[in-house]
Amino acid sequence: MSDNESVLLEAYQRFQETGPEWGGHHLSNHGPMAIEAMIRHGHAGAVHRWIDNYTHRLEEPPRGLVPVTEDDWREALGDLKRVADWTTLFHREVAERPWREVLATWWPRLLPGIIGGTAHGAIRVGHVVHSLLAAEADPRSEPRSADSADNPYLVELANALGYWAACWTPVTGDPSRRPGSLRPAEALAAVPTVADQEKGVPYRLSQLPTTDGWQSALGALRAVDDPEQVPTLLTQLIDATVFRYLSYGHGHAVMLVHASTAPTAVLRVLPALPHELWVPSVDAAWQASAALTAACTPQHAADRADLAVHTDGVTIVEDTMSRAVDHGDEHVIKFADTAVDVFARTGDRDALAASSRCVALITLAEAKGRARFDGRTPPK
């Protein structure tokens, strides 16, 4: 077992004693996601200190109510009060069947509700599946990593799937009905914004059925029928959302992060899925990104001249991740994780500039009161 894997397993075990949400405002526990990204980018040495600082705000796992069964799971979808019932179901599932088989069964059931919890359930699944695939490919990884129901990987997968099922929320519109031919950047630019952006994301998303042009915008992205085309379309979507964050991140510094990290999670899960699930996966990823774009895009883009501090700043991946980890915010870390992937694919420094702007915008949000709201310590 590598040193990095050892730290990851220890970290997963620490988060087993924490609940999926905290603070009374449906704030998601980002710990397992952030530490996976930190370790993968070479910051394992900072993980336990980061967890020490993060876990003080978290709560214990909730108690179960009534078991979820194969006969009644549809009725339990989207019921956060049943989150412990859902995780119990998935703990049993991964104990009885190979984890890929469990994922293949439940992925299509959960996809229509990907936006639930601002996509945190799906994103959490993406991070742990990414780590499971890496463990399977690493000859140094212990064999139990892939086939023991009580190992930290599978416990985290069960918890992630359970949270997704409990916060499952559909969004109006059919993302598979796409007669359009636009590339992702063009399609995102055509997404209309909801009229009232003064309240939280669930309220904003509730306006989509009455937002003029929503379904036509959802159908504007070019469709794919061949699963082999899906990774390319997904990467183009992720790239476009990261580049848009540089110009529009001030619309909602935190929530627009998920327009990028949600499709990133889907991309990372693809290798573990049967090919027949790839096209529905990109459809759902597009719907999530488009919905968050509609909910959080401001009226005007930032002036390019005002972004010079970011576009002329960090120029290498290592500095981008180091700055994110030093900042410590979980959204900053997860967005940097996606942004450096985009830079690796495209060589476009605007991806790193977007990560830099994310640091600045979330620092500003903390200074304006987010720190008091969610229990973190404001940066000095």
Image (spheres, grey):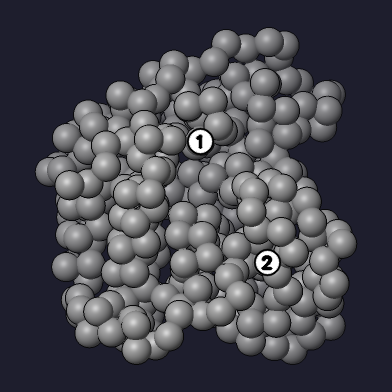
Q: Which mark is residue 301?
A: none
User: Can residue 336 be seen in this snapshot?
Assistant: no
Vertical side of 72 occupied by 234: above or below: below
Q: Quadrant of residue 16?
A: top left
Few, some or many residues within 10 Å of mark 1 (<14, 14–19, 20+): some
Give me the C-alpha separation between circle 1 and circle 2: 21 Å
Q: Earlier in the sequence, mark 1 or mark 2?
A: 1
* Image coords of residue 82 (percent x, y): 68, 21
Regarding mark 2 in the picture, which secondary structure is present there? helix
Vertical side of 133 occupied by 90: above or below: above
Q: Which residue is mark 1?
A: 27
Few, some or many residues within 10 Å of mark 2 (<14, 14–19, 20+): many
Circle 1: residue type: Leu
Q: Residue at x 12, y 43 (%)?
A: 45
Residue nearest the viewer, comparing 319 with 38: 319
Q: Which residue is mark 2?
A: 294
